[in-house]
Amino acid sequence: MDEVLYAVLAENIGRYLDVADRGAAHSVELRRLVAAWRALLDVHRPTGRGGRCTGCAESRRRPTMCNVWRVANAFFIRPEG
Ligand SMILES: [Zn+2]
C-alpha cells in the first residue's frame, strides 16, 4: 500500500477506534472488539517490500491495499448504509 494512503487511513481509522473505545466504557465486548481490530490492523501494517503487510506477505498479487484495510475503510470510514 502507498505510504501516503496508509498514513491517511491509519490516522482516520485510529481516530474512529479511539472514539469507539471511549464510547465503549461500559461494554467489555465492544472494548474487546476495538482491541481486536487494533491488533489485526497492526499485523497488517504495510512494512514489507513494496508496501506489503507482513500478514499478507505470501500474496503474489501486486502490492495494493490489503483486504483487512479495505474492510476497515469500508466499515469505519466510508460506511454505505
Ligand atoms: Zn494484509
Image (tube, grey):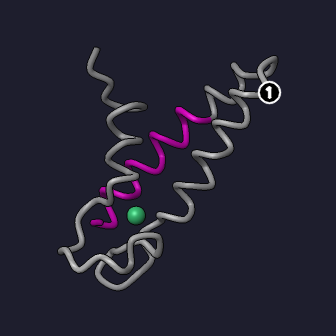
Residues in magenta?
A: 1-17
Residue at the image point whose x is 27% and y is 66% from the top: 2
Residue at the image point whose x is 79% and y is 27% from the top: 28
Drawn side of residue 16 relative to residue 8, left or right: right
Residue positioned most to the left: 62
- The amino acid marked with disc number 1 is Val
Figure quadrant of residue 59: bottom left
Residue at the image point whose x is 46% and y is 51% from the top: 10
Report the magenta stretch's main SS: helix
Residue positioned most to the bottom: 49
Q: Position of residue 35 (x, y in %)?
A: 68, 44
Q: Tell me if residue 46 comes above or below residue 75 in the rendering.
A: below
Q: Tell me if residue 68 comes above or below residue 62 in the rendering.
A: above
Drawn side of residue 33 relative to residue 62, left or right: right
Figure quadrant of residue 21: top right
Residue at the image point whose x is 47% and y is 41% from the top: 13
Dividing the image into four equal quarters, which quarter contains ligand 1? bottom left
Q: Position of residue 80 (x, y in %)?
A: 26, 21
**Quadrant for the C terminus in the image:** top left
Dot 1: what SS? helix
Q: Position of residue 33 (x, y in %)?
A: 64, 36
Q: Tell me if residue 54 comes above or below residue 78 in the rendering.
A: below
Asked if the magenta segment contains residue 5, the reply would be: yes
Residue where numbered disc 1 is placed: 28
Asked if the magenta segment contains residue 48, the reply would be: no
Q: Position of residue 54 (x, y in %)?
A: 46, 75
Q: Tell me if residue 41 comes above or below residue 73 in the rendering.
A: below
**Neighbours of disc 1 within 10 Å: few (<14), some (14-19), many (20+):** few
